[in-house]
Image: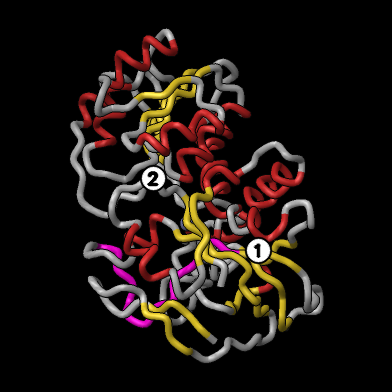
Amino acid sequence: MKAAVFRGVGRPLSIEDVALPQAGAGELVLRVHYCGVCGSDLHATHPGLFVVPEGTVLGHEFSGEIVESGASDWKVGQLITALPNNACGECREQGFGECRNGLGMICPQNRLTGFSPKRPGALAQYVKVPAGQAIALPAAVGARDGAMIEPLAVGLHAVDAAQIGIGARVLVIGAGPIGLAVTAFARQAGAAHVVVSEMASGRLAIAADFGATALIDPAQQEVGPAFARAAGAPPDVIFECVGVAGLIQQCVDLSKPRGRIVVVGVCATPDQITPQRAMAKELSVQFIMGYAKTDWRRVLDLLDAGRIDPGAMVTDTVSLDELPAAFEALRHPSGQIKLLVKP
Ligand SMILES: [Zn+2]
Ligand SMILES: [Zn+2]
């Protein structure tokens, strides 16, 4: 089968012929219908703390049709998506993690599908997943939106962590897929104001489709005063959805006293804050890592009920052969939001 293989920093993904995966007991093999490219795929192939080994096949946001099943409750031909987790399933017992609470994402044993050569991802024609992570996709949701559940679930998990009250004033920094998902779910959670700050004008314009009540271009306007003009007071909750050093301190300075900062953006470099400035306001800062399986099921229900439509996030769909060039293009600022691959 064809797969996009990482061959080292500075080299484009290489489309190669690799062995077809085979389903062992408790495993499923899917023919991939769609796989999204994520900001963390770019991080993982860029110099820094978080580079994947050579030989890795990326791709952790996918949907597909079962072609081989090693689990009696899953049948060939079913359309599914699956969490990329390969966690131990047990570790809450030993006190090391939270698998028993459905949070395999923060299990110390977890090795994500699409981030190591041992767990090849779905930027390929076929991918293998543990049956325990599979979720069936109803026809009304379909394969394209099925591949969007992963980033949407990150947004939902972050909004839960923010404990947004009805009528809250919310600032979302960054309007990539996660920022847009956060925007939509924050509105649904009862926020009166969801103001989005984003430098890329294409992304900023789309934020209105996801429920943003006001838009700020931080290159043109100072965020604090612009937020206060739009919402009447400083933010109760700020979501950092970019992942660039310096932004957490900006959130501290923008927050109202006793506000909450939720850090969703992946920053893999050291960052500096002045704790006293956060103490002086008694701020809460919560970091987010992924989601639980229950978040995926809730996103699926919202998609099925037509309460969220991620269609506007999908700015391009390419074949596997077109992927290497499209992937490199994402490294430079552009109007792209979500690139989908249809292998
Ligand atoms: Zn992702
Ligand atoms: Zn575990």
Please tell me how crowded label 2 is: few (under 14), some (14-19), or many (20+) other residues with Cα within 10 Å: some
- Tell me if I can see residue 69 in this picture: yes
Identify which residue is drawn at 30% across, 57% down: 331
Name the residue carrying label 2. 335
Q: The magenta stretch spans which residues?
A: 49-62
Residue 70 in percent (x, y) is at 72, 83
Indicate the amino acid at tag 2.
Answer: Gly
Q: Secondary structure at mark 2?
A: loop
The residue to which callout 1 is attached is 81
The residue depicted at 69 percent of the width and 80 percent of the height is 26
Image quadrant in which you'd find residue 222: top left
In the drawing, what numbered circle is on residue 104? none
Q: Position of residue 280 (x, y in %)?
A: 26, 19
Per the image, label 1 sits on a secondary structure element best described as strand
Q: Nearer the viewer, mark 2 or mark 1?
A: 2
Vertical placement of residue 158 versus 128, above or below: above
